[in-house]
Image (tube, rainbow, N blue to C red):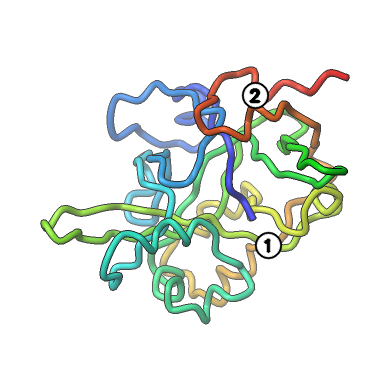
Amino acid sequence: MCGRFQISKKVDDIQVRFHVDVEAEWNRQIYNAAPTMTLPVITSREPGLLNFYKWGLIPFWAKDADIGQKLINAKAETLAEKPSFKNALKSRRCLIPSDGFYEWRKEGNKKQPFRICMKDEGLYAYAGLWESWKDPSGQTVNTFVIITTRANELVAAIHDRMPVILLPEFEKHWLDIQLPSAEALQFLNPFPSEEMKAYKVSEKVNSVRNDTAELILPLTP
């Protein structure tokens, strides 16, 4: 599962890394992104633009928005089967820029948070799906879900699953809706563990009210 991540690079860095323009004035650095937040995404509909969608997928056919609180992750292994995801897999794919995520491991009577990121601290993208849903008043709500897969060797020591981090050469292909779903699914594999690192961080990350650079500092003994 992926329930928290960060997108703490400056917007200029995101623009350069993903070759996108920015939809609106946005200067936030988010160290503790959580479900229901509105966060940066790059969609198959506008692959050259950084948009801002709510985390928690609301399928277009949903009767109310509450379902979005449950659909924050989607298993890669069952995307093509689940009613909530199979239509979006065909034509509504997205990238979620990030530079690290958090996962928790049980240690004694507590759960210890870890930060997991690239060894070079660089930006990367999670594979995701997006939807547009209209609320009863007719207002459009844009949402997304992060796809997960089995953990690589590094993450497996902490948790059995991890978000799908796309290899850079697959990012444009993932957004190409001319690519059949069956072929797109082949991109959804664990990222190579030798390019990543993981370390313990403060339990302050447990609260979404905390959102500062202090959260990504290694925990000192």
Q: Position of residue 85 (x, y in %)?
A: 45, 71
Extreme left residue here?
A: 137
**Residue at x 67% of width, y 40% of height:** 102
User: Is residue 220 shown above or below 208?
Assistant: above
Can the viewer see residue 166 in this picture? Answer: no
Extreme bottom residue here?
A: 81
Per the model, the C-alpha gap separating discs 2 and 1 is 25 Å
Q: Quadrant of the C terminus?
A: top right
Left or right of 200 in this view: 84: left
**Residue at x 76% of width, y 42% of height:** 111
How packed mark 2 is, by other alpha carbons closer than 10 Å (few <14, some 14-19, many 20 or more), is: some
**Residue at x 49% of width, y 38% of height:** 18
Under circle 1, the secondary element is strand
- Of circles 2 and 1, the one toward us is 2
Of 95 and 62, which appears nearest the observer?
A: 62
Residue under numbered circle 2: 215
Residue under numbered circle 1: 149
Q: Position of residue 91 (x, y in %)?
A: 38, 68
Where residue 124 sits, quadrant-wise, is: top right
| Number of numbered discs | 2
Q: Position of residue 166 (x, y in %)?
A: 62, 52
Q: Position of residue 76 (x, y in %)?
A: 61, 68
Contact flag, marks 2 and 1 (Cβ < 8 Å): no
Q: Amino acid at mark 2?
A: Leu
Of 108 and 103, which appears nearest the observer?
A: 108
Q: Quadrant of the N terminus?
A: bottom right
Under circle 2, the secondary element is helix
